[in-house]
Amino acid sequence: MKVQNFAEILGADFYTGVPDSQLKALCNYLMDRYGIDPKHHIIAANEGNCTALAAGYHLATGKVPVVYMQNSGEGNIINPVASLLNDKVYAIPMIFVVGWRGEPGVHDEPQHIYQGEVTVKLLEDMDIATFIIGKDTSDDEVRAAMEGFKPLLAKGKQAAFVIRKGALTDAPAVTYRNMNRMLREEIIRHIVKATGEDAVVSTTGKASRELFEIREANGQSHKYDFLTVGSMGHSSSIALGVALNKPERRVWCIDGDGAVLMHMGSMAVIGANSPKNLIHIVINNSAHETVGGMPTVASEINIVGVAKACGYPEAVAVYSFDGLDRELEAAKERNELTLIEVKCSIGARDDLGRPTTTALENKQSFMAGLSE
């Protein structure tokens, strides 16, 4: 169905969410209509954040908000849905729009398979009424579902539209860009040159895909790298766990700004433990590029300042390859917990591939490499 028709049926004037490629039509529609507007549309740090923000909107206005997300974000909403929104607690109505990655019978990446299997069940277990929209679902069917949801919403319950691949169409074209010049793949190539045989933990999305292809092109082993193909926002915590338990090994974390924002509390834990063998690199393009390029708030905050406030002994931002190379070498020599923020442009190769090894093979190879 046309995304504008879907929005009109929802009848909401406030949306908040975390972007998803399956919902790119809706995301582009919202950016084209509202941009980032605190009265109508906010891209939040994580899905629980969205849910609480939407709850505040309802408390202030009495209206029903819409929260959009990939189904991988359902885990982040369980606590606020169960302990805040539920009609046994505050009875706060809300509409969720959930992109269905890993739908059974539809090929997808490994991190989406199990999540896809339990997507609808998780919503039902949280007492959220659900309607699935596919390519063949008519406007009238969606309108009827929305009419059926209204009495539930009036009682302080929640409802969800689960969106199959390609179900929403006719989105306006939106171009996302920034003023930075360094490409992420080239940044990672410089990092790989500096890391040598050190352990590397890379964040979910295109960064891990680019790291894998760079190793392939270099003829290098993949045993040095743990590719965090899911669990957005958790690669730095994985790297911390490795660094604390392998103090004799230098560990690098290749992170992204959207991932850092999603679970920023991990930086406080890293700073408090301050492992001398951990180097945390945040490639900041201020965008959720892997799922379409919608902006994050990373252009509005001081990531280096956050790191220092969290206890990182060293933190610096770089804007050029010369600066990057200089700081990579300095981090190796100083033997202190270090954060390097790298200002990055938006963009990736159209022919960027995906890892040809399985997630389990990646884990086994990485663990074997660590034990050498």
Image: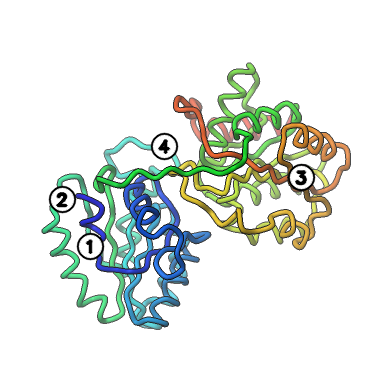
Q: In the image, what residue type sits under mark 4?
A: Glu
Residue sitting farthest toward the right: 334
SS class of the residue under badge 3? strand
In the rendered image of this protein, does residue 176 appear above or below residue 93? above
CA–CA distance in space, label 4 to label 2: 25 Å
Q: In the image, what residue type sits under mark 1?
A: Glu
Answer with mark 3 or mark 1, whichever residue precedes in sequence.
1
Answer with mark 1 or mark 2, whichever residue precedes in sequence.
1
SS class of the residue under badge 4? loop
Horizontal relation, residue 99 to residue 202: left or right: left
CA–CA distance in space, label 1 to label 2: 16 Å
Percent x, y of residue 52: 47, 72
CA–CA distance in space, label 3 to label 4: 29 Å
Q: In the image, what residue type sits under mark 3?
A: Leu
CA–CA distance in space, label 3 to label 1: 49 Å
- Residue at screen point 25% across, 80% down: 154
Residue bearing the label numbered 4: 109
Residue bearing the label numbered 2: 137
Q: Nearer the viewer, mark 1 or mark 4?
A: 1
The label on residue 278 is: 3
In this view, the residue in front, 286 or 366, is 286
Horizontal relation, residue 250 to residue 4: left or right: right
Q: Are marks 1 and 2 in contact (CB under 8 Å)?
A: no
Residue sitting farthest toward the left: 140
Q: Inspect this view and state whether residue 229 appears.
A: yes
Q: Nearer the viewer, mark 3 or mark 1?
A: 1
Q: Nearer the viewer, mark 4 or mark 2?
A: 2
- Residue at screen point 51% across, 42% down: 177
The label on residue 8 is: 1
SS class of the residue under badge 1? helix
